[in-house]
Amino acid sequence: MDHYFYDGRDLSTALETHYDVGLVVPSVAIAILASYAALSVAGRISAADSGHKRRIWLLAGSFTMGGGVWAMHFIAMLALKLPIAVSYDVLITIVSTVPVILASYVMLKVISRTKISKLIFLASVVMGGGIGAMHYIGMAAMQGISRQLIMMFEPRLLVLSVLTAVVLSGIALTIDFIIGRNKKGQGAIWAKIGASVIMGCAISGMHYTGMAATYFFAGDASPVFTESVLNTNALVFWVSFTSVLIALLSIFITIVDSRIQQATLEEAVSRSRMREAIESIADGFCLFDMDDHLVECNQRYREIMNFGTPIVPGMPFESIMRNAAQAGLILDADGCVEEWLAERMARHRTPRENFVEHFRGDRWIRVSERRVWNTGTVAIRTDITELKQTEIELSKAIAEAQKARAIAEEANSAKSAFLANMSHELRTPMNAIIGYSEMLLEDVQASQQDTFVSDLLKIHSSAIHLLSLINEILDLSKIEAGKMELFLEEIHLPSVINEVTNTVQQIVDKNGNKLTI
């Protein structure tokens, strides 16, 4: 096929052309679908967490977009109907895919950036130029079968076709970059659909504008063909099917990858929150799986179980306990590591109630273990050293108090015995004093020696009072022994007052005081 810029020849000699609408519509739809797939891949490129994944997505998106654009162009070329039979050169057709794949690579690399860039304009130019290059190289693959096919281009429409691709590509990329990135959920999807439609129109608009700029003429010479010429009759279905399948697979994979990444992110956030919650626990926390391998523990647990070897997930419970016992961390295991370990393992496998372990440095750790169905064992280790020390001090205080009480009771018993003995010893002479005072009082009254009566009455009254005090001391001993019986009796108040007055009157007179009743 010969192709030139239009040289002003008579257009009435140009071949009449028309389009098969049944192929035009699928060509546009494939362009839109490929654009949506490519923009979806761009989102995964941005979200990729490694350079390797970004490169894979970038290549996949480039071939998806490039293949979709090429499929749109090829089906649209098949939709063009000429009065002469045409076919396509295989090598040129394959080469025509290279510019658009490279352009797609550049475009996706630019729009996958996390920040808006002036390179979007460059991406639009590259993408529009790539579409145009693919289109016109692909048209060069057309071959007349029975007659030579001459193709001429109208320069202004040719430039317009490329500008159409550049401008619409720029609009589509801007919509996806600015609007799609700032919206979530349905808003982002609709922005992507809108950008895909505009990008599809850029691809289709460029093609059909370029076709409008093309005039076909039939030559006289019969071209020579090789086996590298394609038969166009059976290609429509397979090109369409393959392009749609690739685009749909790309969209499906991006959706699946997005959901997997979202689930992974949510899991990471959930795990991070769980980790923070575990670390915020003031006590030592650990979780073992069904096989008694460590799944998770906080820093406090590592501090409590610090036996010199780092504790990491996956360590067996038995190894942790054995290392702790052999390092002398747990005093309960001194001299009997194997026996203690066997008992500890049995208690771990069938936990029932909390227990206390004595650690090096006179520390006391309370252990609480619970078996969780289909999960493993959860354990909490609480440092109760201060509580244990308080308990020990309280026990000592109670023992000392009991000892002091025993001493006090013994002293009180001695006191009671002393008082009883002294009261008995005092009572005998007091009875004698009372008896002799009464005898003297009777003799004085009989001999009418009244001057001695007053003094003898005072001696007798004082002796009676002292005897009552001795009896009261004995009553105190009975009260302490719980044997005192109390009873009510009447007293003659004037007599009591008179006895008190007579007892203290001499002391009052001696000191020059005056007592008035």
Image (cartoon, helix red, strand yellow):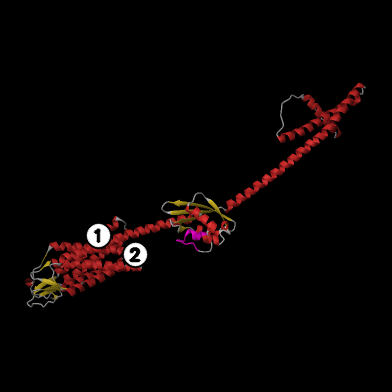
Q: In front of the other: label 2 or label 1?
A: 2
What stretch of residues is rendered in magenta?
A: 310-321
208, above or below 304, in the image? below
Where disc 2 sits, the SS reads loop
Residue 332 falls left or right of residue 92: right
208 is within the stretch colored magenta = no
Q: Position of residue 65 (x, y in %)?
A: 24, 66
Q: Position of residue 387 (x, y in %)?
A: 58, 51
- Nearest the viewer among 292 and 310 is 292
Evaluate whether residue 296 shows in this view: yes
Q: Earlier in the sequence, mark 2 or mark 1?
A: 2
> Which residue is painted at 25% across and 59% down in the image?
193
Give the image quarter of residue 515: top right
Residue 429 falls left or right of residue 490: right
- Nearest the viewer among 444 and 187 is 444
Q: Residues within 10 Å of mark 2 (few under 14, many from 20)?
A: some
Q: Disc 1 residue type?
A: Gly
291, above or below 493, in the image? below
Where disc 1 sits, the SS reads helix
- Nearest the viewer among 468 and 109 is 468
Mark-to-mark CA distance, 2 and 1: 24 Å
Q: Are marks 2 and 1 in contact (CB under 8 Å)?
A: no
320 is within the stretch colored magenta = yes
Q: Quadrant of the C terminus?
A: top right
Give the image quarter of residue 489: top right
> Which residue is painted at 80% across and 34% down in the image?
423
What's the mark number on residue 48?
2
Q: Disc 2 residue type?
A: Ala
Q: Quadrant of the N terminus?
A: bottom left
Q: Position of residue 469 (x, y in %)?
A: 79, 32
What's the mark number on residue 194?
1
